[in-house]
Image (spheres, rainbow, N blue to C red):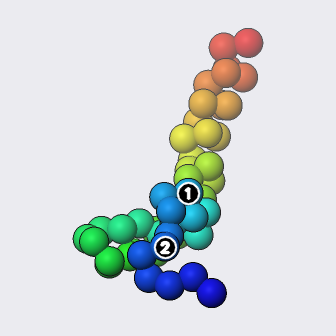
Amino acid sequence: MTTRGQFTKKMLADINLRETRPGVFEYIGPPQNNRPRNKSVHRNSTETQ
């Protein structure tokens, strides 16, 4: 079992947590790759073709 202070940055990213202050973690929701930015880029690429 992991105790407080043993989390790595990658572990925090995998479980969608952000360390707002030392020892204070905040849930930041779904993974970053679900942002609509990817859809807009895809739509722009199809329009130019």
Left or right of 10, for residue 17: left
Above or below, comparing residue 42 to residue 28 in the picture:
above
Q: Quadrant of residue 24?
A: bottom left
Q: Front-most of 48 and 3?
A: 3
Whether residue 30 is visible, yes or no, is no
Q: Front-most of 18 and 23?
A: 23
Q: Residue, x 62% and y 53% (percent of image)?
A: 34
Instruction: Mark 1 vs mark 2: give the one in front.
Output: 2
Above or below, comparing residue 45 to residue 3 in the picture:
above
Q: Which mark is residue 6?
A: 2
Q: Front-most of 42 and 33?
A: 33
Residue identified by numbered label 1: 10
Q: Give how far across and how far down residue 38 sits, in percent.
A: 61, 39
Structural distance between the alpha carbons of marks 1 and 2: 12 Å
Left or right of 22, for residue 11: right
Q: Give how far across and how far down residue 33 sits, in percent.
A: 62, 49
Which amino acid lies under the numbered mark 2 shown in the image of this protein? Gln
Q: Give how far across and how far down residue 2 sits, in percent.
A: 57, 82
Q: Residues within 10 Å of mark 2 (few under 14, many from 20)?
A: few
Q: Give how far across and how far down residue 29 sits, in percent.
A: 52, 69
Above or below, comparing residue 48 to residue 17 in the picture:
above
Q: Quadrant of residue 30?
A: bottom right
Element at badge 2?
A: loop
The C terminus appears in which quarter of the rendering?
A: top right
Q: Front-most of 5 and 9?
A: 5
Element at badge 1?
A: helix
Q: Residue furthest top?
A: 49
Which amino acid lies under the numbered mark 1 shown in the image of this protein? Lys
Q: Residues within 10 Å of mark 1 (few under 14, many from 20)?
A: few
Q: Residue, x 32% and y 77% (percent of image)?
A: 23
Whether residue 42 is visible, yes or no, is yes
Q: Which mark is residue 37?
A: none
